[in-house]
Amino acid sequence: MLTSFFAKSKPINITLVLVLLSGFFIAANFQNWFLDFEILKFFKILGVFLALMLALFLLNFIAKKNDLTQRSAYKILLFSVFCASFFPLLKDYNVIISATLILLALRRIISLKSQITVEKKIFDAAFWICIASLFYFWSILFLLIVLGGIVIYSPRPKNWLIPITSAVCVYLIYCSIHLLIYDQFYLISDWYQPYNFDFSNYQSFKFLTPISIILALTLWSLVYYFSIIQKAGVSLRPSLNLILFTLIIGVSVGIFAPSKNGSELIFFFIPLSIIVSNYFDTGRDKIFREILLLILILMPFGVLFIQNK
Protein backbone atom coordinates (compact mmCIF):
# COMPACT_ATOMS: atom_id res chain seq x y z
CA MET A 1 0.00 0.00 0.00
CA LEU A 2 2.72 2.50 0.96
CA THR A 3 4.93 1.42 -1.93
CA SER A 4 2.03 1.79 -4.35
CA PHE A 5 1.26 5.28 -3.05
CA PHE A 6 4.83 6.59 -3.31
CA ALA A 7 5.47 4.77 -6.59
CA LYS A 8 3.93 7.81 -8.28
CA SER A 9 5.18 11.37 -8.21
CA LYS A 10 1.99 13.38 -7.81
CA PRO A 11 1.34 16.69 -6.01
CA ILE A 12 -0.24 14.86 -3.06
CA ASN A 13 2.87 12.68 -2.60
CA ILE A 14 5.23 15.64 -2.80
CA THR A 15 3.03 17.67 -0.43
CA LEU A 16 3.05 14.92 2.20
CA VAL A 17 6.84 14.64 2.00
CA LEU A 18 7.19 18.42 2.33
CA VAL A 19 4.91 18.40 5.37
CA LEU A 20 6.94 15.58 6.94
CA LEU A 21 10.30 17.29 6.49
CA SER A 22 8.88 20.72 7.42
CA GLY A 23 7.40 19.32 10.62
CA PHE A 24 10.69 17.85 11.78
CA PHE A 25 12.63 20.97 10.79
CA ILE A 26 10.24 23.16 12.80
CA ALA A 27 10.40 20.76 15.76
CA ALA A 28 14.21 20.81 15.71
CA ASN A 29 14.42 24.61 15.47
CA PHE A 30 11.29 25.61 17.39
CA GLN A 31 13.07 27.23 20.33
CA ASN A 32 15.60 29.17 18.23
CA TRP A 33 13.00 30.11 15.64
CA PHE A 34 10.04 31.11 17.79
CA LEU A 35 10.68 31.04 21.56
CA ASP A 36 13.97 32.97 21.41
CA PHE A 37 12.56 35.23 18.73
CA GLU A 38 14.79 37.75 17.00
CA ILE A 39 13.80 39.19 13.64
CA LEU A 40 17.19 38.62 11.97
CA LYS A 41 17.48 35.11 13.36
CA PHE A 42 13.92 34.36 12.25
CA PHE A 43 14.67 35.24 8.62
CA LYS A 44 18.01 33.44 8.77
CA ILE A 45 16.35 30.18 9.82
CA LEU A 46 13.57 30.78 7.28
CA GLY A 47 16.23 31.08 4.58
CA VAL A 48 17.81 27.79 5.67
CA PHE A 49 14.37 26.14 5.66
CA LEU A 50 13.78 27.32 2.09
CA ALA A 51 17.25 26.03 1.13
CA LEU A 52 16.32 22.60 2.50
CA MET A 53 13.07 22.62 0.51
CA LEU A 54 15.05 23.66 -2.58
CA ALA A 55 17.41 20.73 -2.00
CA LEU A 56 14.42 18.41 -2.04
CA PHE A 57 13.15 19.80 -5.35
CA LEU A 58 16.64 19.76 -6.87
CA LEU A 59 17.08 16.10 -5.95
CA ASN A 60 13.73 15.28 -7.53
CA PHE A 61 14.54 17.31 -10.65
CA ILE A 62 18.00 15.79 -11.15
CA ALA A 63 16.73 12.23 -10.82
CA LYS A 64 13.73 12.73 -13.13
CA LYS A 65 15.50 14.84 -15.74
CA ASN A 66 18.34 12.34 -16.15
CA ASP A 67 16.30 9.13 -15.72
CA LEU A 68 18.30 8.14 -12.64
CA THR A 69 15.15 6.67 -11.09
CA GLN A 70 11.63 5.95 -12.21
CA ARG A 71 9.07 8.73 -11.82
CA SER A 72 8.27 7.97 -8.20
CA ALA A 73 8.35 9.94 -4.96
CA TYR A 74 10.68 7.50 -3.22
CA LYS A 75 13.84 9.60 -3.59
CA ILE A 76 12.44 12.70 -1.89
CA LEU A 77 10.69 10.59 0.77
CA LEU A 78 13.92 8.76 1.55
CA PHE A 79 15.97 11.95 1.66
CA SER A 80 13.41 13.47 4.03
CA VAL A 81 13.29 10.54 6.47
CA PHE A 82 17.09 10.25 6.45
CA CYS A 83 17.52 13.95 7.29
CA ALA A 84 14.66 13.95 9.81
CA SER A 85 16.32 11.10 11.72
CA PHE A 86 19.19 13.40 12.75
CA PHE A 87 18.10 16.54 14.62
CA PRO A 88 21.65 18.01 14.64
CA LEU A 89 21.49 17.95 10.84
CA LEU A 90 18.30 20.01 10.84
CA LYS A 91 19.97 22.50 13.20
CA ASP A 92 23.20 22.82 11.21
CA TYR A 93 22.44 25.68 8.84
CA ASN A 94 25.85 25.68 7.17
CA VAL A 95 25.68 22.03 6.21
CA ILE A 96 22.17 22.41 4.74
CA ILE A 97 23.22 25.36 2.57
CA SER A 98 26.38 23.53 1.51
CA ALA A 99 24.41 20.41 0.52
CA THR A 100 21.98 22.50 -1.52
CA LEU A 101 24.89 24.06 -3.40
CA ILE A 102 26.36 20.59 -4.01
CA LEU A 103 23.05 19.57 -5.59
CA LEU A 104 23.26 22.60 -7.90
CA ALA A 105 26.75 21.44 -8.88
CA LEU A 106 25.63 17.83 -9.38
CA ARG A 107 22.89 19.03 -11.70
CA ARG A 108 25.47 20.74 -13.92
CA ILE A 109 27.88 17.79 -13.87
CA ILE A 110 25.33 15.19 -14.95
CA SER A 111 24.04 17.51 -17.68
CA LEU A 112 27.50 17.36 -19.31
CA LYS A 113 26.24 14.31 -21.21
CA SER A 114 24.34 16.64 -23.57
CA GLN A 115 27.72 18.04 -24.75
CA ILE A 116 26.15 21.53 -24.84
CA THR A 117 28.09 24.46 -23.28
CA VAL A 118 30.45 21.99 -21.61
CA GLU A 119 32.97 24.60 -20.42
CA LYS A 120 30.25 26.71 -18.79
CA LYS A 121 28.80 23.70 -16.98
CA ILE A 122 32.20 22.65 -15.66
CA PHE A 123 32.86 26.19 -14.45
CA ASP A 124 29.42 26.42 -12.80
CA ALA A 125 29.77 23.06 -11.06
CA ALA A 126 33.20 23.90 -9.64
CA PHE A 127 31.96 27.38 -8.70
CA TRP A 128 29.03 26.00 -6.67
CA ILE A 129 31.26 23.45 -4.93
CA CYS A 130 33.83 26.08 -3.98
CA ILE A 131 31.08 28.27 -2.53
CA ALA A 132 29.70 25.22 -0.68
CA SER A 133 33.14 24.70 0.88
CA LEU A 134 32.95 28.19 2.41
CA PHE A 135 30.00 26.93 4.46
CA TYR A 136 31.35 23.41 5.07
CA PHE A 137 35.02 22.94 4.22
CA TRP A 138 35.10 19.21 3.48
CA SER A 139 32.47 19.56 0.76
CA ILE A 140 35.47 20.66 -1.35
CA LEU A 141 36.02 16.92 -1.93
CA PHE A 142 33.13 17.04 -4.39
CA LEU A 143 35.49 18.72 -6.84
CA LEU A 144 36.50 15.13 -7.56
CA ILE A 145 33.02 14.67 -9.07
CA VAL A 146 33.75 17.52 -11.47
CA LEU A 147 36.97 15.78 -12.49
CA GLY A 148 35.04 12.54 -12.87
CA GLY A 149 32.52 14.30 -15.12
CA ILE A 150 35.36 15.65 -17.26
CA VAL A 151 36.90 12.18 -17.59
CA ILE A 152 33.59 10.62 -18.61
CA TYR A 153 32.08 13.28 -20.85
CA SER A 154 34.72 15.71 -22.11
CA PRO A 155 38.39 14.89 -21.36
CA ARG A 156 39.86 17.71 -23.43
CA PRO A 157 43.06 19.28 -21.99
CA LYS A 158 41.60 22.79 -21.57
CA ASN A 159 38.70 21.47 -19.49
CA TRP A 160 41.09 20.43 -16.72
CA LEU A 161 42.00 24.08 -16.12
CA ILE A 162 38.40 25.27 -15.74
CA PRO A 163 37.87 24.06 -12.12
CA ILE A 164 41.08 25.85 -11.10
CA THR A 165 39.86 29.06 -12.76
CA SER A 166 36.53 28.70 -11.00
CA ALA A 167 38.20 28.20 -7.61
CA VAL A 168 40.38 31.29 -8.12
CA CYS A 169 37.28 33.35 -9.02
CA VAL A 170 35.48 32.26 -5.86
CA TYR A 171 38.52 33.07 -3.72
CA LEU A 172 39.00 36.52 -5.26
CA ILE A 173 35.31 37.41 -4.90
CA TYR A 174 35.06 36.19 -1.31
CA CYS A 175 38.42 37.69 -0.36
CA SER A 176 37.27 41.08 -1.72
CA ILE A 177 34.03 40.91 0.27
CA HIS A 178 35.92 39.82 3.40
CA LEU A 179 38.41 42.66 2.96
CA LEU A 180 35.62 45.24 2.63
CA ILE A 181 33.73 43.99 5.68
CA TYR A 182 36.55 43.00 8.06
CA ASP A 183 39.46 45.00 6.61
CA GLN A 184 41.64 41.90 6.39
CA PHE A 185 42.38 39.17 3.86
CA TYR A 186 40.60 35.84 3.95
CA LEU A 187 43.31 33.23 4.59
CA ILE A 188 43.36 29.50 3.96
CA SER A 189 43.56 29.02 7.74
CA ASP A 190 40.18 30.79 8.02
CA TRP A 191 38.70 28.38 5.47
CA TYR A 192 40.21 25.08 6.57
CA GLN A 193 38.45 22.87 9.13
CA PRO A 194 40.62 20.15 10.73
CA TYR A 195 39.58 16.56 10.16
CA ASN A 196 38.39 14.41 13.03
CA PHE A 197 38.41 10.61 13.18
CA ASP A 198 36.63 10.34 16.52
CA PHE A 199 33.43 8.36 15.88
CA SER A 200 32.49 7.88 19.54
CA ASN A 201 29.33 10.00 19.12
CA TYR A 202 27.95 7.31 16.82
CA GLN A 203 27.84 4.93 19.80
CA SER A 204 24.96 6.94 21.23
CA PHE A 205 21.69 5.04 20.81
CA LYS A 206 19.99 7.99 19.06
CA PHE A 207 22.70 7.89 16.37
CA LEU A 208 23.47 4.17 16.37
CA THR A 209 19.89 3.11 15.60
CA PRO A 210 19.29 5.15 12.41
CA ILE A 211 22.89 4.70 11.22
CA SER A 212 22.61 0.91 11.56
CA ILE A 213 19.34 0.84 9.62
CA ILE A 214 20.68 3.15 6.91
CA LEU A 215 23.95 1.21 6.59
CA ALA A 216 22.12 -2.11 6.19
CA LEU A 217 19.79 -0.48 3.65
CA THR A 218 22.79 0.89 1.74
CA LEU A 219 24.46 -2.51 1.40
CA TRP A 220 21.19 -4.17 0.39
CA SER A 221 20.34 -1.52 -2.20
CA LEU A 222 23.83 -1.46 -3.72
CA VAL A 223 23.39 -5.07 -4.85
CA TYR A 224 20.37 -4.01 -6.92
CA TYR A 225 22.07 -0.81 -8.07
CA PHE A 226 25.06 -2.66 -9.51
CA SER A 227 22.63 -4.86 -11.40
CA ILE A 228 20.84 -1.78 -12.76
CA ILE A 229 24.15 -0.27 -13.91
CA GLN A 230 25.03 -3.46 -15.79
CA LYS A 231 21.65 -3.49 -17.56
CA ALA A 232 21.60 0.26 -18.29
CA GLY A 233 22.10 1.64 -21.77
CA VAL A 234 25.33 3.25 -22.91
CA SER A 235 23.95 6.78 -22.48
CA LEU A 236 22.60 6.22 -18.95
CA ARG A 237 25.43 4.17 -17.43
CA PRO A 238 27.90 7.09 -16.96
CA SER A 239 25.30 9.05 -14.97
CA LEU A 240 24.57 6.06 -12.73
CA ASN A 241 28.31 5.62 -12.16
CA LEU A 242 28.61 9.30 -11.21
CA ILE A 243 25.93 8.81 -8.55
CA LEU A 244 27.91 5.87 -7.20
CA PHE A 245 31.06 8.03 -7.16
CA THR A 246 29.09 10.76 -5.38
CA LEU A 247 28.14 8.21 -2.72
CA ILE A 248 31.83 7.41 -2.16
CA ILE A 249 32.67 11.12 -1.85
CA GLY A 250 29.75 11.55 0.56
CA VAL A 251 31.20 8.81 2.76
CA SER A 252 34.62 10.50 2.58
CA VAL A 253 33.14 13.83 3.70
CA GLY A 254 31.57 12.05 6.67
CA ILE A 255 34.89 10.41 7.59
CA PHE A 256 36.85 13.69 7.53
CA ALA A 257 34.07 15.79 9.10
CA PRO A 258 35.30 17.85 12.08
CA SER A 259 32.13 17.14 14.07
CA LYS A 260 30.48 13.71 14.10
CA ASN A 261 26.91 14.60 15.08
CA GLY A 262 24.99 13.24 12.08
CA SER A 263 24.84 16.53 10.15
CA GLU A 264 27.79 15.46 7.99
CA LEU A 265 25.71 12.57 6.62
CA ILE A 266 23.53 14.84 4.48
CA PHE A 267 26.11 14.62 1.67
CA PHE A 268 25.84 10.83 1.86
CA PHE A 269 22.04 10.96 1.84
CA ILE A 270 21.88 12.77 -1.53
CA PRO A 271 23.18 9.89 -3.69
CA LEU A 272 21.87 7.25 -1.29
CA SER A 273 18.29 8.45 -1.81
CA ILE A 274 18.66 7.86 -5.55
CA ILE A 275 20.28 4.45 -5.10
CA VAL A 276 17.70 3.18 -2.60
CA SER A 277 14.88 4.62 -4.73
CA ASN A 278 16.03 2.33 -7.53
CA TYR A 279 15.58 -0.65 -5.23
CA PHE A 280 12.02 0.37 -4.33
CA ASP A 281 11.30 1.06 -8.02
CA THR A 282 12.52 -2.31 -9.28
CA GLY A 283 12.39 -4.73 -6.33
CA ARG A 284 9.91 -7.58 -6.72
CA ASP A 285 9.50 -8.63 -3.08
CA LYS A 286 6.52 -6.36 -2.43
CA ILE A 287 5.77 -7.42 1.17
CA PHE A 288 9.38 -6.90 2.23
CA ARG A 289 9.46 -3.50 0.52
CA GLU A 290 6.25 -2.51 2.32
CA ILE A 291 7.71 -3.45 5.71
CA LEU A 292 11.03 -1.76 4.93
CA LEU A 293 9.39 1.47 3.78
CA LEU A 294 7.20 1.53 6.89
CA ILE A 295 10.29 1.10 9.11
CA LEU A 296 12.03 3.97 7.31
CA ILE A 297 9.03 6.29 7.67
CA LEU A 298 8.73 5.46 11.37
CA MET A 299 12.49 5.79 11.96
CA PRO A 300 12.59 9.60 12.55
CA PHE A 301 9.60 9.34 14.90
CA GLY A 302 11.41 6.59 16.84
CA VAL A 303 14.55 8.72 17.08
CA LEU A 304 12.46 11.67 18.28
CA PHE A 305 10.93 9.46 20.98
CA ILE A 306 14.39 8.26 22.08
CA GLN A 307 15.69 11.84 22.32
CA ASN A 308 12.76 13.01 24.44
CA LYS A 309 12.72 9.97 26.69
Image: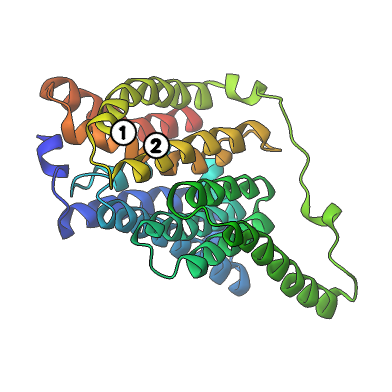
Percent position (x, y) of residue 182? 86, 74
Q: Quadrant of residue 79?
A: top left
Percent position (x, y) of residue 234? 27, 42
Does the rendering let one see residue 36? Answer: no
Does the rendering let one see residue 186? Answer: yes
Which residue type does callout 1 highlight?
Val
Tag 2 secondary structure: helix
Residue at image point 33% right, 35% down: 275
Which residue type does callout 2 highlight?
Leu
Q: In the displayed structure, would residue 242 be above or below residue 39? A: above
Per the image, the residue denoted by label 1 is: 276
Tag 1 secondary structure: helix
Residue at image point 41% right, 47% down: 24
Crowding near pointer 2: few (<14 within 10 Å), some, many (20+)? many
- Colour convention: rainbow
Per the image, the residue denoted by label 2 is: 272
Percent position (x, y) of residue 192? 78, 49
Residue at image point 59% right, 19% down: 203
